[in-house]
Image (cartoon, rainbow, N blue to C red):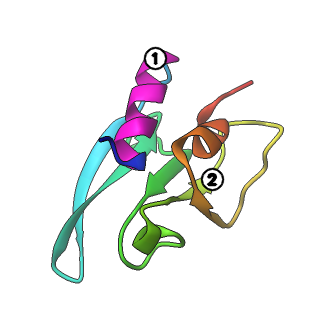
């Protein structure tokens, strides 16, 4: 069974949306972010960890947006991969 981060990575790859996986730690526990288009030029990212909104339920938190119809200057949480990908799309 795939978790929401894995589902999001698969959806991004299928839609040919550029992204990178970035590993880091939260309170000593390893976690991963999905950043787009890259870590250096990050416009939008998604995380899922114990302190993210929805993380304890396995859901995603997104910050930023590449989608001009979904301005996002704060975090949006409790998202499935299907909901989160809308912020990664440019149209």
Residue 59 pos. (x, y %): 49, 60
Q: Residue furthest right?
A: 69
As rendered, which of 22 and 77 lies closer to the eye?
Answer: 77
Is there CB contact under 8 Å for labels 2 and 1?
no
- Measuring 34% from the left and 37% from the top, which residue is drawn there? 20
Residue 72 in the image, given as x and y percentages of width and height: 73, 56
Residue at (59% x, 36% y) in the render: 88
The residue carrying mark 1 is 14
Q: Is residue 69 visible?
A: yes
Q: Residue at x 40, y 62 (%)?
A: 48
Instruction: Point out the tag, 2 or 1, that comes first from the N-terminus.
Output: 1
Q: Horizontally, is 8 left or right of 31 in the view?
A: right
Counting every numbered tag in the picture gives: 2
Q: Relative to the observer, which residue lies in front, 1 or 13?
A: 1
Q: Nearer the viewer, residue 42 or 70?
A: 70
User: Element type at marker 2?
Assistant: strand
Q: Is residue 13 magenta?
A: yes
The residue indicated by pointer 2 is: 64
Q: Quadrant of the N terminus?
A: top left
Q: Is residue 76 magenta?
A: no
Q: Main secondary structure of the magenta part?
A: helix
Image vertical order of residue 36 relative to residue 90, above or below: below
Report the span colored magenta: 5-15
| Farthest front residue in view | 1
Where the C terminus falls, by quadrant? top right
Q: Is residue 44 left or right of residue 91?
A: left
Q: Nearer the viewer, mark 2 or mark 1?
A: 1
């Amino acid at each position: 069974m795939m978790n929401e981060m894995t589902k999001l990575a698969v959806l991004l790859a299928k839609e040919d949306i550029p992204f990178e996986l970035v590993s880091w730690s939260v309170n000593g526990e390893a976690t991963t972010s999905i950043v787009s288009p890259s870590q250096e030029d990050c416009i939008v990212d998604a995380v899922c960890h114990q302190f993210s909104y929805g993380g304890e339920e396995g859901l995603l938190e997104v910050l930023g947006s590449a989608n001009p119809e979904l301005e996002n200057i704060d975090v949006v949480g409790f998202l499935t991969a299907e909901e989160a990908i809308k912020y990664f799309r440019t149209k």
